Image (cartoon, rainbow, N blue to C red):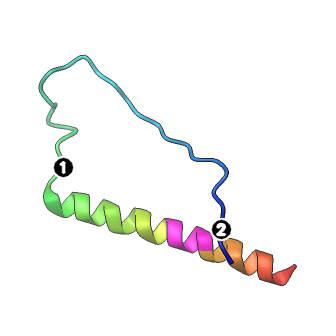
Amino acid sequence: MPIEIKELLIKATISTDTAPSADTTLSQEEINRLKKEITKEVTDKVLRTLQQKNER
């Protein structure tokens, strides 16, 4: 059964600084960890939605 995503919320912060500050610089390990965390969270939400649909 296909899942249709009806709403996608994207938030962004735009600054006028030309050089990135030390607070926003991430290492490759941190980027990979965040990607895995986001993927896991999205997967959990999709599975939860599927379970709710099957229970109905």
Give the image location of residue 38, x and y in percent. Answer: 42, 62
Position of 54 with respect to 32 (left or right) is right
Looking at the rendered structure, the secondary structure element under dot 1 is loop
Give the image location of residue 7, x and y in percent. Answer: 64, 47
Above or below, 20 relative to 7: above
In space, the residues marked 2 and 1 are separated at their CA atoms by: 33 Å
The residue shown at (57%, 47%) is 8
Looking at the rendered structure, the secondary structure element under dot 2 is loop
Pick the front one: 21 or 12? 12
Pick the front one: 39 or 5? 5
Position of 49 with respect to 45 (left or right) is right
Pick the front one: 48 or 24? 48
The residue shown at (39%, 66%) is 37
Location of residue 32 (image quadrant): bottom left
Q: Quadrant of the C terminus?
A: bottom right
Residue identifier under label 1: 26
The residue shown at (17%, 43%) is 25
Mark 1, other Cα within 10 Å: few <14 / some 14–19 / many ≥20? few
Location of residue 35 (image quadrant): bottom left
Return the residue found at the far top. 16
Q: Which residues are magenta?
A: 42-46
Residue identifier under label 2: 3
Identify residue type, mark 1: Leu
The first of marks 2 and 1 along the sequence is: 2
Q: Which mark is residue 56?
A: none
Above or below, 20 relative to 53: above
Position of 33 with respect to 17 (left or right) is right
Give the image location of residue 31, x and y in percent. Answer: 24, 58
Residue 43 part of the magenta segment: yes
Residue 30 part of the magenta segment: no
